[in-house]
Image (cartoon, rainbow, N blue to C red):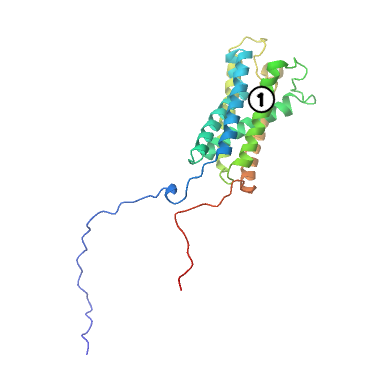
Amino acid sequence: MTAPIPRDLPDLPAIPRTHALLPTSVPASAVVTPVRRPPAAAFRLLLAGTAAAGVILAFLLGSPLRVLSHFAIQSNILLALVTLLSARRAWTARRPLPAALTGAALLYVMITGLVYHLLLTDAAVPFSLTGMTTPTGRHLIAVHLLHTVTPLAAFLDWLLLTAPGRLRLRRAATWMLYPVLYLVFCLARAQLIAPGAPGRYLYPFLDAEAHGYRHALANALLLGLSFYALAVLLVALDHARPNPISHRIKTGFRLRPPVG
């Protein structure tokens, strides 16, 4: 015989807590062994030095304020700083810089190279500078360092030395803020310079004095759409390309065959 089960069970007293449960987080370095990457650090250090050399040479050959106003100079300064920090992190086995920052630096320096080679040096384009004074000597070296060497090297660094899948499409619109601010800066700068003065407009496709504001803003809109398309293309390529730095990750856990 068993005792009947009561219909109403009495309330049980609460179990007293001896201590509060605190959230804990385990750093990735406790499980995954950090990996130093000396080749990537060396390449990025060389890239940062190349960008810095081109900027310094440009400052020595021209007016500092006017040189600093160019998009190519600003983008190469950003690239030099970002790659220098990336080199340090690769050498010390630290986490890479945020992809939003490295992606912006890559996009801006690629804009520098593409605009120079497709618009400013192509004789078939109406905004070409080929009819003007051809750079020679140290000026030619600075031009190629800033517009050819660093964009190509930055693209190779991203393609061959970084893990894929880190760029996000939502960042493409954010990256467009700087080109828009640079457009406002160029137009405002032109208002502070006397009409007809040489170098009033830094780029021929933004020359509102020669073509009118409507034409200059239309050019800026087309370029902005092209820059956004380039940003989207970089994000798409980042998610489609293979991982060039895949390696076997060593953790603190070891799987052993069962005994018996």
Q: Nearer the viewer, residue 254 or 156?
A: 254
Q: Which quarter of the rendering shows the N terminus?
A: bottom left
- Return the x and y of residue 83 as percentages of the image width and height: 56, 32
- Return the x and y of residue 117 as percentages of the image width and height: 72, 28
Res 203 visible: no
Res 151 visible: yes
- Return the x and y of residue 69 as percentages of the image width and height: 59, 19
- Identify the image quadrant of residue 46: top right
Task: Give neighbour class at mark 1: few <14, some 14-19, many 20+ (Cα, 10 Å).
Answer: many
Rendered residue at 78%/17% (across/down): 131
Rendered residue at 51%/34% (across/down): 88
In this picture, residue 12 sits left or right of residue 130: left
**Amino acid type, callout 1:** Leu
Q: Identify the residue under disc 1.
A: 145
- Identify the secondary structure beneath mark 1: helix
Rendered residue at 60%/16% (across/down): 59
Placement of 59 over or under 236, stated as above or below: above
